Amino acid sequence: MTDRKTQIKQAALAVFALYGLRRTSMQDVAAEAGLSRPALYQYFRNKEDLIAACIDMVTEEGFAQSEAAAANEASMAGKITAYLSTYMIYYHRLLIRGPHSEDMLAITTRFGDSKINAVRQELATQLNQYAGLEPDDQTGVILAHSTEGLKHQAPDEATLEQQIKVLVAAFITTP
């Protein structure tokens, strides 16, 4: 059942990318997943439940890609830069650059501060870990919030990556 749920979420993400979250119907998702609409409801109670599951899946993927990028770096600053760049570029592509970015941002925000805050906290904790700091140190929070702002303002991925490098270099002065 879990594999089928993953396939449905992947189908939903493909349809969301085409039509946006608001315009996508459960029938659209069912057709993309090769299911009937009633069968889709056996996996997800409603569209909100499906969107929330997709947000969780995308979040996990963003963190996994970031961890893999950081693992390839030797220095503390390199790990932090790779982690933040990969994470923010992943979301820049998904939420900022897409044709339905305003729709995506509005809907994901609607799904609650608790989800968003949990992700921000996990990001800050991971950054502190790479920096050798306590999990609740404010450095991770500042880096996470700063790069989130950069993600929304950067005109392109290359600029975003360069700005993240400058930010990390300003905060992380040890090897």
Image (cartoon, grey):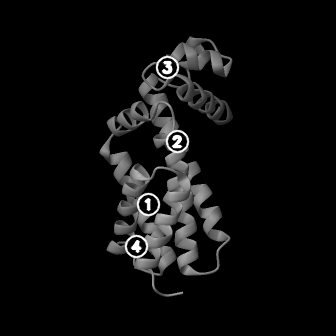
Q: Name which of mark 3 and mark 1 comes first in the sequence.
A: 3
Distance from label 4 to label 1 (Cα)?
9 Å
Distance from label 3 to label 1 (Cα)?
30 Å
Q: Residue at x 57, y 12 (%)?
A: 37
Q: Nearer the viewer, mark 4 or mark 2?
A: 2
Q: Which residue has dot 4 on it?
A: 135
| Left-right relation of 138 to 92 | left
Distance from label 4 to label 3 (Cα)?
39 Å
Rendering coords of residue 124 (x, y %): 41, 65
Q: Name which of mark 4 and mark 1 comes first in the sequence.
A: 1
Look at the numbered disc 3 and give the secondary structure of its residue.
Answer: loop
Rendering coords of residue 109 (x, y %): 34, 39
* Contact, mark 4 vs mark 2 (Cβ under 8 Å): no
Q: Residue at x 39, y 70 (%)?
A: 140
Q: Amino acid at mark 1?
A: Glu
Q: Amino acid at mark 3?
A: Thr
Look at the numbered disc 4 and give the secondary structure of its residue.
Answer: loop
Q: Which residue has dot 3 on it?
A: 24
Q: Residue at x 48, y 26 (%)?
A: 20
* Contact, mark 3 vs mark 1 (Cβ under 8 Å): no
Furthest residue to the bottom? 174
